[in-house]
Amino acid sequence: MRPLGKHVSPRQVALFAAGLVFFGATTYDVHRSIKNNDQPPTREQMEALQVYTTPRSVRTNRYCKFCFPIWTSDDLLNYVSSISEQLKVVDLLRQLYELAKADSDLSDHEDMLSIIEQK
């Protein structure tokens, strides 16, 4: 191709088009971010940002006098109860597996007995 008297390969055209698409997408994203940031952040967003920006070593240090706890007692109780419920479900699934395995073994033995009785 020879637009404007210079030779341009299709690869260069594709690269230029990809650059335009990238520039347009970036411009749109910046515009959308500015538009969305017109509203002040909510209290929950500010708390989440505070927790996110606090270093992990400070958040998990039990001996720090100035650290705030991440987990409240209600959160901890809910977490422990959800784990115990999950363990109950796992135990029930294990029992169901054992019953299905025993049933399968029993049907295999019944098939073998019927073959032996036919002979």
Image (cartoon, grey):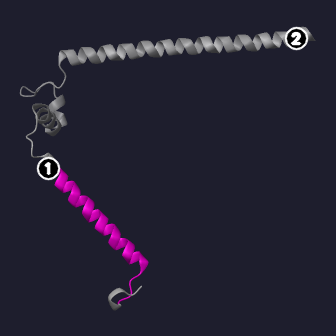
Q: Residue at x 6, y 28 (%)?
A: 66
Secondary structure category for the residue under label 2: helix
Residue 15 among magenta residues: yes
Q: Residue at x 11, y 26 (%)?
A: 68
- Mark 2, other Cα within 10 Å: few <14 / some 14–19 / many ≥20: few
Q: Residue at x 27, y 59 (%)?
A: 25
82 or 29, nearer to the observer = 29
Residue 10 among magenta residues: yes
Where is residue 73 drawn, in percent x and y?
A: 19, 15
Where is residue 84 drawn, in percent x and y?
A: 36, 13
Residue 116, disc: 2
Task: Tell me which label, 1 or 2, sits earlier in the chain.
Answer: 1
For this orientation, the residue located farthest to the right is 119
Amino acid under disc 2: Ile
Query: Would you identify the image quadrant in which residue 101 lies?
Result: top right
> Circle 1 is placed at which residue position?
35
Amino acid under disc 1: Lys
Q: Nearer the viewer, mark 1 or mark 2?
A: 1
Q: Residue at x 71, y 10 (%)?
A: 106
Query: Which span of residues is magenta-colored?
Result: 6-34
**Quadrant of the image for the C terminus?**
top right
Where is residue 80 drawn, in percent x and y?
A: 30, 15
